[in-house]
Image (tube, rainbow, N blue to C red):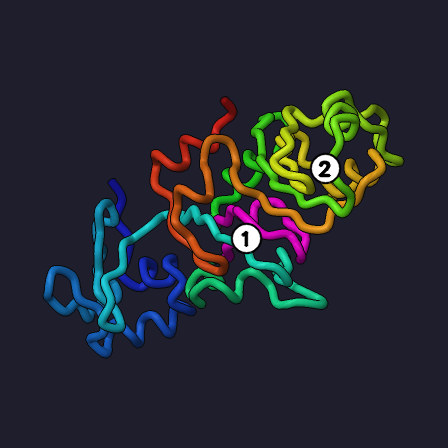
């Protein structure tokens, strides 16, 4: 249980500077349970709080945990250089909250991308010590062979790695399709492993992280959703 002043509540939810949030409150734009609250100094219990602003109900969230179905040609960067950033796919208030991608997907890779404003969560999810499996659907330029699958399972040597890297599992899904499960999360890992094994990745899609599957979230490309506690629990190592 915690209480915050109303202006701090609005600011924490990404609605702008403290000064701007105070003006919204004083203008009667904020209501709780149908009652207008126009004193920005008023302290409000945040647990279970739902307030109304801009004719929309807003659920107070101390932190946000988001899954985005990333489309092609979006960069996982707050300062993109060649393509739009993934933050442009989110409402402006989430940018004000300093939401950041958890790890990165290449601009041409699609699929599940986690985002949050919780630094501890971002650090934990990005740590290689967690061994969280990530499932990728890879389209190959050349036909998949049994030899390719075995190489990826046995391990391939990348130029800047001290030891070979191996897929946790690797299953052929079609003539040019592989399902690859990795734990390490190295830079461009799937693409570099396929190249080292003598093939080439022409398209890549991340379909799951841990036990959380993108298909279960029902998100079209470019869509996002908040994750609940049960969904967050699926991100833990198996």
224 vs 23: above or below: above
SS state under label 2? loop
Question: Magenta region: which residues?
Answer: 98-116
Residue at the right extreme, as displayed: 159
Q: Is residue 110 magenta?
A: yes
User: Could you tell me residue 166's position as x and y percent?
Assistant: 73, 25
Location of residue 21 in the rendering, given as x and y in whole percent from the top left corner: 34, 70
Decide if residue 131 is on the left or right side of residue 160. Answer: left
Q: Nearer the viewer, residue 176 or 90?
A: 176
- Identify which residue, 13 or 142, lies in the foreground: 142
Say whether residue 43 is visible: yes
How packed mark 1 is, by other alpha carbons closer than 10 Å (few <14, some 14-19, many 20 or more), is many
The residue that appears at 67% across and 36% down in the rendered structure is 185
Label 2 sits on residue: 186
Is residue 165 something that shows in the picture? no
Please name the residue shown 49% across and 58% down the image. Answer: 221
Query: Closest to the observer: 22 or 112?
Result: 112
Residue situated furthest bottom in the rendering: 27
Q: Position of residue 125 (x, y in %)?
A: 55, 36
């Amino acid at each position: 249980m915690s209480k915050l002043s109303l202006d701090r509540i609005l600011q924490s939810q990404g609605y702008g500077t403290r000064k701007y949030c105070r003006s919204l409150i004083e203008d009667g734009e904020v209501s709780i349970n149908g009652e207008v609250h126009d004193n920005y100094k008023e302290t409000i219990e945040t647990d279970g709080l739902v307030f109304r602003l801009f004719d929309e109900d807003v659920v107070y969230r101390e932190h946000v945990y988001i899954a985005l179905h990333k489309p092609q040609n979006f960069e996982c960067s707050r300062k993109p250089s060649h393509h739009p950033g993934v933050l442009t796919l989110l409402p402006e208030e989430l940018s004000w909250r300093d939401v950041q991608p958890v790890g990165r997907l290449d601009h041409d890779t699609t699929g599940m991308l986690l985002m949050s404003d919780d630094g501890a969560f971002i650090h934990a999810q990005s740590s290689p010590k967690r061994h969280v499996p990530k499932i990728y659907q890879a389209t190959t330029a050349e036909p998949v062979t049994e030899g390719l699958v075995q190489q990826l399972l046995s391990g391939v040597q990348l130029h800047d790695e001290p030891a070979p890297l191996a897929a946790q599992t690797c299953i052929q899904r079609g003539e040019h399709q592989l399902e690859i499960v990795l734990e390490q999360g190295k830079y461009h890992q799937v693409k570099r492993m396929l190249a080292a094994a003598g093939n080439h990745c022409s398209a890549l899609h991340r379909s799951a992280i841990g036990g959380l599957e993108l298909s279960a979230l029902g998100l079209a490309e470019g869509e996002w959703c908040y994750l609940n506690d049960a969904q967050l629990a699926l991100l833990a190592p198996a």
